[in-house]
Image (tube, grey):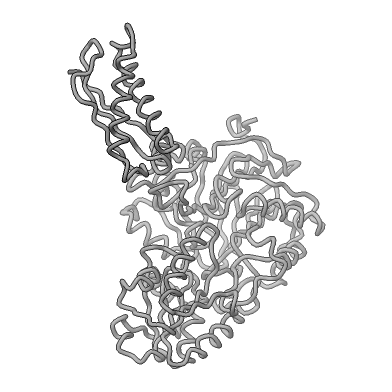
Amino acid sequence: MNVHRTKAKSELLFLALGGSGEIGMNVNLYCCDGKWLMVDLGMTFADPHYPGIDLVFADLEFIEDRRKDLLGVVLTHAHEDHIGAVPYFAEELGVPLYATPFTARLVQAKLDEAGIADRVKLNILPNDSAFSLGPFDIRYVPLAHSIAEGNALLIDTPHGRIFHTGDWKLDDEPRVGVPATEEELREIGDEGVLALVCDSTNVFNSAASGSEGAVRAGLLESVAAQRGRRVVVTTFASNVARLQTLGEVAQACNRQLCVAGRSLDRIIGVAKASGYLKDFPDTISPEAAMDLPRGEVMVLATGGQGEARAALARIAGKQHPITLEAGDVVLFSSRQIPGNELAIGRIQNTLADRGINIVTDRQSMIHVSGHPGRPELVALYDWIQPEMLVPVHGEIRHMAEQARLGLSEGIPRAIVQKNGDLVRLAPDGPVKIGEERAGRLLLDGELIVPADGEAISARRKLSQFGLVTVALAANREGKLVSPVEIASIGLPLDDDMAAFVAEAQADVAQAIRDMKGDRKRDPLALAEAVRLAARRATQRWTGKKPVVQVMLREG
């Protein structure tokens, strides 16, 4: 039932195009009486399933077809999985963006870099501000997270109020920003909340996420213990609270601070321009850092997720001005994002092989998550008292578990939705009323292409099975008039390649001789017989069925 394709009804709808059934790529849509509001426009990073691809986006076809009814895009905070797709789609959507100052500065830089800043309206709103878009009255509600200006959205509509949490946690000592208090959140709940649309990432964590203040103590202890050693700390560049903490730790340990990584430089600049990091120490260049005694410098480096081109990977591979020796220390003040374990492991193994000590959050209190554990979720349920719970921002198992938790804690209704599920929140919700396209798009070089397109499918096959190319010429009667030439890429036949080629050439020639009648004179049939003969020969030799490309010309 595609309600949105009929005359607009008096109802409140929710549709996730990204971020429900996965962690990352958050794109959420609300519809009130036919008008749409987008919350966040994020991306995610590709995995080996998409060879040669770096960035993955939600397919926005659904809302692009309804852009005349789209009122704006409201951004909760500046993490890439919430704003990373903005420079690729904002101009095409053609609606204003709304963000608080820190987020807006980072978005502005993206628009400038993309060359579209003069064609996209970016509204910079004060923290705690309220504004209206059609039937939606929206208020930013600050919550603690692992970035400056993490916000929930209180969205008031004629059908009831939505509390959209964004990414959040509870933190009595957040170090940066002033999150809403329990009393302020209880007041929101006392005024009535129809739906709590809530982050599910850490629902399986039985303990609360922990405070940034506790991380300060852990980092201070860990760095102070490294007397006479060079220390590198890697963390998420966007975690302004952590940067504040690390600046203070460097000063407390009488170490000069060196920053290695352009994203760290950018975030520090934006944070200072937004009124944060006011007492952050002056930094020194990598070259100046190398001139200091080992125990008098602390390096902040990008690359804690194993990124091959980031500073930490180049430091580990001895391709950076910052050098480390046996006995020096690298502190991983970040968690492993699922999917990055192998890349992180490679860097840690490289460091360990050089005798460099590694400290992670498993050994010391040097990181806390920016997402809520079960005790924090339960507390928010009690304060907000929603009529229904809509888990988002998680894999299906995370969202299903949060739905169970919410129901067990007294929330009357919950729904487990996924990308593409059209959900009616009011009246008489929550209920799934339809399914819409929620595909993926890929940034392939400078092109945005479908994730399920032929090019990506072929590239995946090539990466798995290799390529065999067969070139030959035949006359109009289907007789060979040139030698059969065979080349391959990706076949494990280094020592046997000549023998394989000779046998495959013979098989192809025999397949052509075996053809009869009109089929032999049909170029398409001839090419297919050649392809199958070459693939069968390759399978005998390797056990694989490669992609076979036939180049047939008429001679």
Farthest top residue in view? 517
Relative to 236, is 54 above or below? above
Q: Is residue 91 visible?
A: yes
Quadrant of the rendered image containing residue 436: top right
Quadrant of the rendered image containing residue 11: top right
Left or right of 195, for residue 528 = left
Q: Position of residue 404 (x, y in %)?
A: 76, 53
Relative to 395, is 268 above or below? below
User: What residue is drawn where x is 30% and y is 12%?
Assistant: 522
User: What residue is drawn where x is 70% and y is 45%?
Assistant: 425
Residue situated in front as seen by the camera: 172 or 56: 56
Q: Position of residue 164 (x, y in %)?
A: 63, 56
Q: Position of residue 83 (x, y in %)?
A: 47, 57
Relative to 281, is 201 above or below? above
Residue situated in front as seen by the camera: 520 or 347: 520
Residue situated in front as seen by the camera: 210 or 476: 476
User: What residue is drawn where x is 33% and y is 52%?
Assistant: 116
Q: Position of residue 364 (x, y in %)?
A: 59, 80
The total of numbered circles placed on residues is 0
Q: Is residue 186 visible?
A: no
